[in-house]
Image: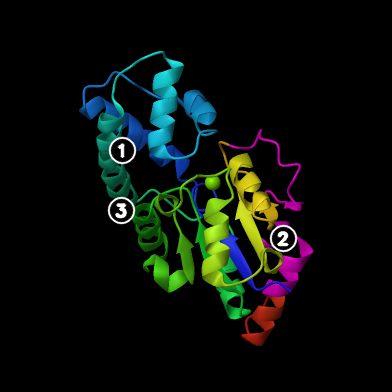
Amino acid sequence: MLRALIFDVDGTLAETEEIHRLAFNATFTASGLDWHWTREDYTGLLRTTGGKERMRRYRQEIGAEQPTDTVIAALHATKTSRYAEMIVAGGLALRPGIRDLVAGARRSGLRLAIATTTNRPNVDTLCRACWGQPAEALFDEIAAGDEVARKKPAPDVYELALERLEIAPAQAVALEDSRNGLLSARGAGIATLAVPSVFTKAEDFSEAQWRADSYRSADLPDFLRDLLSASNQTAGVSA
Ligand SMILES: [Mg+2]
């Protein structure tokens, strides 16, 4: 029996990756580092999860020794604040259908959680910008990247979400936009709905139980659409 939906954040709740990319580039430029990530570069770099890890991967790819890990950590902190400023300034919307899905799942009595590689400040910023509410007002449990040893595709962050929800893997469904996220959820034993985003369309989602083009009701798999329409009827809202 389904008891909870567990959402990824970047690329799932909103198409945040383009803003992350711009925030990285602005941070590099401001610090005098001659790095610039094109959309094409970033599509490849997204296979490495975590911002610091992504910078270290790029440093390795171009055969550089600088910046050091310590400098990378500082750059990443700057990039996180810059990202927040950019989100607060506007320009980020929830993916189509997410608002109704979150509201409908809540009405239907499901618990809602987040399992993300991004850090907690980014989750809060996004929720405040898109919903006008803090993350904890929308989600019962939040498992963030900083809280686990291994990032996606390791199952750690989904296992942490399950532990906090106090439910079994079979009682949850994960919502993911990337292959790394899919492998993380599947590694934790959770059935997954894959809804690819702009940067992940070409990835392999063959292990997903369901795949959809968007979170709009018409695109959702039957079990979710039924759940939402039942909750709408209960609430006296037309479906
Ligand atoms: Mg994602």
- In what element is the residue under mark 1? helix
Horizontal side of residue 151 vs 1, given as left or right? left
The front one of 177 and 51 is: 51
Q: In which quarter of the image is the C terminus?
A: bottom right
Q: Which residue is drawn at 52% across and 60% down?
A: 160
Disc 2 residue type? Ala
User: Residue 76: which numbered mark, if any?
Assistant: 1
Residue ID for mark 2: 218
Give the quarter of the figure containing the N terminus. bottom right
The numbered mark, 2 or 1, whose residue comes first in the sequence reads: 1
Q: In this view, does 221 lie above or below 145?
A: below
Q: Does the magenta stretch include residue 222?
A: yes
Precedes in sequence: disc 2 or disc 3: 3
- Element marked by disc 2: helix
- Indicate the amino acid at tag 3: Val
Residue at 71% over, 79% down: 230
Of badges 1 and 3, nearer the viewer stands 1
Q: Which amino acid does label 1 sit on?
A: His
Residue 75 placement: quadrant: top left
Q: Residue at the spot x=45%, y=45% of the render?
A: 16
Q: Mark 3 points at which residue?
A: 88
Distance in Å between CA atoms under marks 2 and 3: 31 Å
- The quadrant holding residue 204 is top right
The image shows residue 71 at horizontal and vertical percentages of 25, 30
- Residue 171: horizontal and vertical position, in percent? 69, 69
* Residue with the most extreme left position: 31
Mark 2 and mark 3 in contact? Answer it, CB < 8 Å: no
Residue closest to the far top: 63
Q: Is residue 142 left or right of residue 205?
A: left
Q: In front: 217, or 170?
A: 170
Per the image, is 218 magenta?
A: yes
What separation in Å lies between label 1 and label 3 (alpha carbons)? 18 Å
